[in-house]
Image (cartoon, rainbow, N blue to C red):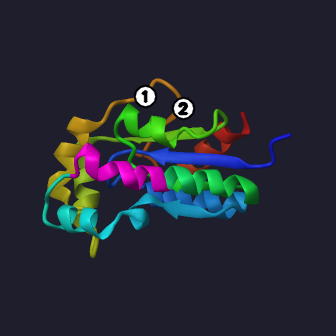
C-alpha cells in the first residue's frame, strides 16, 4: 500500500505556488520544495538578466526535481511548487502515476500586479508574458483559481486531495 503523497503545484510566476505549497505542507505534515531553489546558478543569472530559460537550460533542473520527488517517496512524500509550463516538463516530473497536480490559474493583470510588488526575487515581472506564451494548459489535475483568498485556495486544494 502506498504511504506517500506527491503534490505538484504548477502555474506561471506570481500565482501563489509557494504560498499554497507552504500551507499544504504544514497541513499535511510533509516537506515543501520550491523548484526555484533547485536552479543552477547559470539559470538564475540568465533570469536575473531578463533572459528566459530555454528547454536545454531546464533539463538538468527538471531532472533534479524528479529525483527529489522520487527520493521523497521514502519519507512520506512532498509538495513541490514548480512552474512546469510545458507538458514536456511535466512528463519529466511525472515519476509516479499517483501525483496530485494542482494548476494555478489567474488573470494576467492580477498576476502582473503581484509580481510588481515582489522584492528580491530573480524572476522579473517583465518575463510574465513569456511565461503565458509558453504555458500549455494541461487537461488533468485540478485547476485552481487564484482570484480568491489564500485560505480559500488552501481549502479547495485540500478538498481536491481528499478525492
Dominant secondary structure (helix, strand or loop) of the stretch shown in magenta: helix
For the residue labelled by badge 1, is the local secondary structure a helix, a strand or a loop?
loop
Which mark identifies residue 95? none
What residue is drawn where x is 21% and y is 61%? 47
Q: Which residue lies furthest to the bottom in this view?
A: 120
Q: Name the residue under label 1.
A: 138
- Considering the image in quadrants, where does the C terminus appear? top right
The magenta span reads 53-64
In this rendering, does residue 76 appear at all?
no
Viewer-proximal residue among 80 and 152: 80
Q: Does the magenta stretch include residue 56?
A: yes
Residue 33 rendering spot, x and y as whole percentages: 53, 62
**Dot 1, crowdedness within 10 Å: few (<14), some or many (≥20)?**
some
Label 1 to label 2: alpha-carbon separation: 8 Å
Residue occupied by mark 2:
141
Q: Are marks 1 and 2 in contact (CB under 8 Å)?
A: yes
Amino acid at each position: 500500500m502506498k504511504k506517500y503523497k506527491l503534490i505538484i503545484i504548477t502555474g506561471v510566476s506570481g500565482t501563489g505556488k509557494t504560498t499554497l505549497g507552504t500551507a499544504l505542507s504544514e497541513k499535511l505534515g510533509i516537506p515543501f520544495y520550491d523548484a526555484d531553489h533547485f536552479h543552477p546558478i547559470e539559470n538564475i543569472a540568465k533570469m536575473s538578466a531578463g533572459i528566459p530559460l530555454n528547454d536545454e537550460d531546464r533539463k538538468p533542473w527538471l531532472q533534479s526535481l524528479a529525483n527529489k520527488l522520487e527520493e521523497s517517496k521514502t519519507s512520506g512524500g512532498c509538495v513541490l511548487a514548480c512552474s512546469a509550463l510545458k507538458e514536456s516538463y511535466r512528463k519529466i516530473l511525472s515519476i509516479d502515476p499517483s501525483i496530485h497536480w494542482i494548476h494555478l490559474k489567474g488573470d494576467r493583470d492580477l498576476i502582473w500586479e503581484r509580481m510588481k510588488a515582489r522584492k528580491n526575487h530573480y524572476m522579473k515581472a517583465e518575463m510574465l508574458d513569456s511565461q503565458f506564451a509558453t504555458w500549455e494548459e494541461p487537461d488533468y489535475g485540478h485547476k485552481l483559481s487564484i482570484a480568491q483568498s489564500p485560505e480559500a485556495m488552501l481549502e479547495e486544494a485540500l478538498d481536491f486531495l481528499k478525492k
